[in-house]
Image (tube, rainbow, N blue to C red):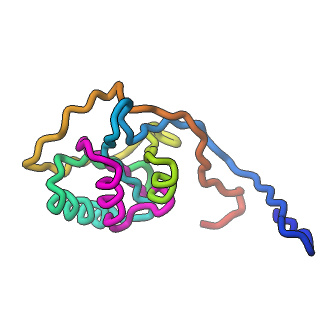
Amino acid sequence: MIIDFKGYRFRLHCSLQKYVDVEGINSNIIGSDNHILIWDFDNTPLPQVIDSLLALQGNWELPPIYIVQSSPEHYHAYCFKLLPMPQVICILATTKGICSNFFKFGILRGYWTLRITPEKGTFKKMMILDSKYKPDKVDLSLLETAKYRTKINWRFKNDRP
């Protein structure tokens, strides 16, 4: 529901959303200026995700990239390469099919967050894009986690898909 107040420069917006509590992992390494690479792909077919990540892997000499399906046509990817923020921005900016909000909010906050717990059920499909380059040794205890709420899609009984 949106209420506009004529003659004033504000509006009241109320909504009803269904949400779930989830846990995420941040890209930044505690005590360092480096980040790991993480990607969020929404409404992107798996072949396009793979093609996009393989191109990046070749261009940037990246180690193996791990892909999980977070929900239908939604994928998360992880690469344990330690890189400074400007280089991470360049890599993510050239990723075809990346979620634009994921990219934008990561730049604004100075780190990216990727959900590591499923919204419902479990993650599906796991795939590894192998590489001749070795991953950096990343102490996983130095990756910050974040608990947050995310909205989930839901429909009323009579809604059509």
Question: In the image, residue 44 lies at what x, y percent?
Answer: 39, 64
79 in magenta: yes
Q: Is residue 92 left or right of residue 59?
A: right
Residue 131 or residue 120, whichever sits in front: 131
Residue 90 or residue 64, whichever sits in front: 90
Which quadrant does the N terminus fall into?
A: bottom right
Q: Is residue 87 left or right of residue 28?
A: left
User: What is the quadrant of residue 21 in the picture?
Assistant: top right
Could you tell me which residue is drawn at 23 percent across and 48 percent down?
Answer: 65
Position of 20 relative to 42 (above/below): above
Total number of numbered discs in the rendering: 0
Question: In the image, residue 60 lies at what x, y percent?
Answer: 18, 58
User: What is the quadrant of residue 52 in the picture?
Assistant: bottom left
Which quadrant does the C terminus fall into?
A: bottom right
Could you tell me which residue is drawn at 51 percent across and 53 percent down?
Answer: 108
Q: Which residues are magenta?
A: 73-102
Query: Which residue extends farthest top?
Result: 141
Residue 65 or residue 105, whichever sits in front: 105
Could you tell me which residue is drawn at 38 percent across and 39 percent down?
Answer: 28
Question: In the image, residue 73 lies at what x, y percent?
Answer: 41, 60
Query: Which residue extends farthest bottom?
Result: 7
Could you tell me which residue is drawn at 32 percent across and 49 percent down?
Answer: 77
Question: In the image, residue 16 lies at what x, y percent?
Answer: 75, 52
Query: Which residue extends farthest left?
Result: 132
85 in magenta: yes
